[in-house]
Image: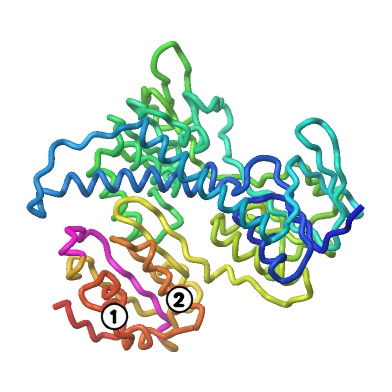
Amino acid sequence: MREYDIAVLGAGPGGYVAAIWGARLGASVALIEKDLIGGTCLNRGCIPTKVMTEAAEALKVLERAREFGIITSNAEVNWGRLASRRDEVVSKLRRGLETILKARKIDLIFGIGSLRPGGGISVERGDGSRTEVKAKKIVIATGSIPTGLPGIDVDEDRVMTSDGALKLTSPPRSLLVIGGGVIGCELGWALRKLGSKEVTIVEALQRILPNEDPDVSRVVASSLEREGVRIMTGRKVEGIEKGKGDLVAFLSSGERIEVEKVLVAVGRSPSLEGIDTKGLGLRMEGGWIWTNDMMETNVPGLYAIGDVTGGPLLAHAASAQGMVAAENALGGRRTFKRALVPSCIYTYPEVGRIGMTEEEARRKAGRVKVGRFPMSANSMALIKGETEGFVKMIADERTGEILGVHMVGPNATELISELSLALGMEAVAEDISRTIHPHPTISEAIMEAAHDLLGMAVHMP
């Protein structure tokens, strides 16, 4: 039996990157996947979701074309074409990954892998046969699965998780979204724009996007409501009655909502199939696999990356962790810095964030300074007709070190990378304020927020 330098269990954005990175560093690598290359992100998550939100945004732009002097006939959504494009994008990206894996001479093994105490992975193939994989180091990258709710039966047809929602070939006439987090807000906004007549988001906490800065939550909530999305916070869905007609959802407030379909979007749980955590002696935290910042578990030679570690539950975080794990499996000493992971929300307007919220910064640093700049005062935002939103920059009052940045507005998901670099280099607000940003661009709002933080705002009264 061949012994690999590294075996990776799971071929999502963490696993396949770990495999490719290890191979590029000269290691022999086996990559084990039970389903499709690309994992949840490519096949049932990030990519198909963004095809939907991009289509919704394109429709939004067409609706506003008259503002630019462009007269168009009424735009319609061809759901057959939209569903086909969603599948085409996913397939093309997956084929590209398969080509890269083959070019890097990574042995791709399809089947359900089980970690064996004492080392090695037993893989059960689709035909029932088994093969054994031996490796010096093993990386667990099995990802996560949608979390269910007690008493609510998910059938992925009438009551869906995001998996079912991303297989829709027509918009539900009416939709109840349980959970006002990122997934709920993105899909709720997209489906409302793409044809659903009624969309209601129910969130148990007091505001949607509860992990974001409150200023961000307010802007997104206001925008969703203007698009016709009903938001109900401070309530729980306690049960769903399935009859021949519409579903009936019962809320903790005593209210009832009748809808065609329900989307359960209350978070995700670790995918631990084939991993005997107790038998392996794995340390767990809150149900997730514990790792240090080198992505090592407490079991020598065993690494874990991505969603299965509990966070951040983001594809780009998993990929970064994959590189760290692969390097360290080959003798490196690289670390992963969770605080430097940006996050993006593809609503309308978009949201980009990195670092702490204002509340978190005050708890940690004590005294902070906050700079703000509204998109309504930005030239390019005005040109685009997208003036909703802001840039909010938070810094340590004593040192000037930037602790967090929150952006709401056009291109926020792209522009947040500038702040990833800034925080990674421990930049101070003055560094950003003195960086020349081209005009007219949305990026100028970042510089202007830094100016405001320093008490030197130029384009605000």
Residue lying at 66% horizontally and 51% vertically, measured from the top left: 11
Task: Give the magenta-colored segment's residue range.
Answer: 381-397
Mark in front: 1 vs 2: 1
Looking at the picture, the colour scheme in use is rainbow
The residue located at (33%, 70%) in the rendering is: 392
Placement of 159 over or under 187, stated as above or below: above
Q: Position of residue 218 (x, y in %)?
A: 31, 54
Q: Is residue 388 magenta?
A: yes
Residue neighbourhood size for the residue with mark 1, other residues' Cα within 10 Å, grouped as few (<14), some (14–19), many (≥20): some
> Which residue shows up at 17% across the image and 44% down it?
63
Marks 1 & 2, CB-CB < 8 Å contact: no
In the picture shown, does residue 344 fall above or below 75?
below
How many marks overall?
Answer: 2
Q: Nearer the viewer, residue 99 or 7?
A: 99
Helix, strand or loop under label 1? loop
Residue at (26%, 85%) from the top-left corner? 455
User: Residue 18's spot in the image, x, y percent?
Assistant: 67, 61
Label 2: element kind: strand
Tag 1: amino acid: His
Residue to which mark 2 is pinned? 403
Q: Nearer the viewer, residue 317 or 147?
A: 317
Say whether disc 1 or disc 2 marks the residue closer to the N-terminus.
2
Q: Amino acid at mark 2?
A: Leu
Q: Position of residue 299 (x, y in %)?
A: 83, 61
Identify the image quadrant of the C terminus. Answer: bottom left
Residue 314 lies in quadrant = bottom right
Measure the alpha-carbon separation of dots 1 and 2. Answer: 21 Å
Give the residue pinned by disc 1.
Answer: 437
Find out whether residue 78 is within the magenta segment: no
Residue 166 seen from this side = yes
